[in-house]
Amino acid sequence: MVLSLKERIDKAYEAACGLADREANNKRAMRHLVGVVMGVVRRGMAGYSLAEDELDQNEKARDIRYGLLQLPFLANLMSPDGPSNIALLP
């Protein structure tokens, strides 16, 4: 249940990255909320080295994904609803 909440926040973050005004405050709040959720998960997995390693890998992948989403073209391509009709060639 907690991880499904994180997934919903991730999708909302992806959608916010595709909006014209860039939603900076909302995105910052969503990143913070994902951090809180993953902190809860991490505390629940404390002592399980394999789970902790997987959480570390997931965090690195999320940081990379969130970084890529800062580029409007990639945010559009990575949108949860699929890319919008954008002209790829002039």
Image (cartoon, helix red, strand yellow):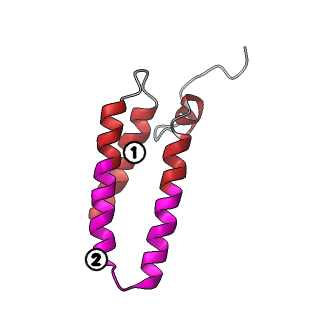
Residue 37 lies, with reference to residue 49, above or below; the image says above
Residue 34 lies, with reference to residue 27, above or below; the image says below
Magenta stretch secondary structure, dominant: helix
Point out the image quarter for the C terminus.
Answer: top right
Percent across and percent down for residue 53 are 49, 76
Q: Which residue is mark 2?
A: 44
Secondary structure under the numbered disc 1 in the rendered image: helix
Percent across and percent down for residue 68 are 56, 42
Residue farthest to the right, as pictured: 89
Dot 2, crowdedness within 10 Å: few (<14), some or many (≥20)? Answer: few
- Quadrant of the rendered structure where residue 20 is? top left
Q: Nearest the camera: 61 or 86?
A: 61
Three-letter residue code for mark 2: Gly
Q: Which residue is mark 1?
A: 11
Three-letter residue code for mark 1: Lys
Number of numbered discs present?
A: 2
Which region is colored magenta? 32-61
Residue at 37% of width from left, 54% of height from top? 7
- Quadrant of the rendered structure where residue 35 is? bottom left
- Quadrant of the rendered structure where residue 85 is? top right
Give the Cα distance between marks 1 and 2: 24 Å
Residue at 44% of width from left, 84% of height from top? 49
Percent across and percent down for residue 36 are 27, 58
Residue at 54% of width from left, 32% of height from top? 76
Residue 86 lies, with reference to residue 76, above or below; the image says above
Secondary structure under the numbered disc 2 in the rendered image: helix
Q: Is residue 25 left or right of residue 81?
A: left
Disc assigned to residue 75: none
Residue farthest to the top, as pictured: 90
Q: Is residue 42 left or right of residue 80?
A: left
Residue at 58% of width from left, 35% of height from top? 74
Mark 1 or 2, nearer chain start: 1
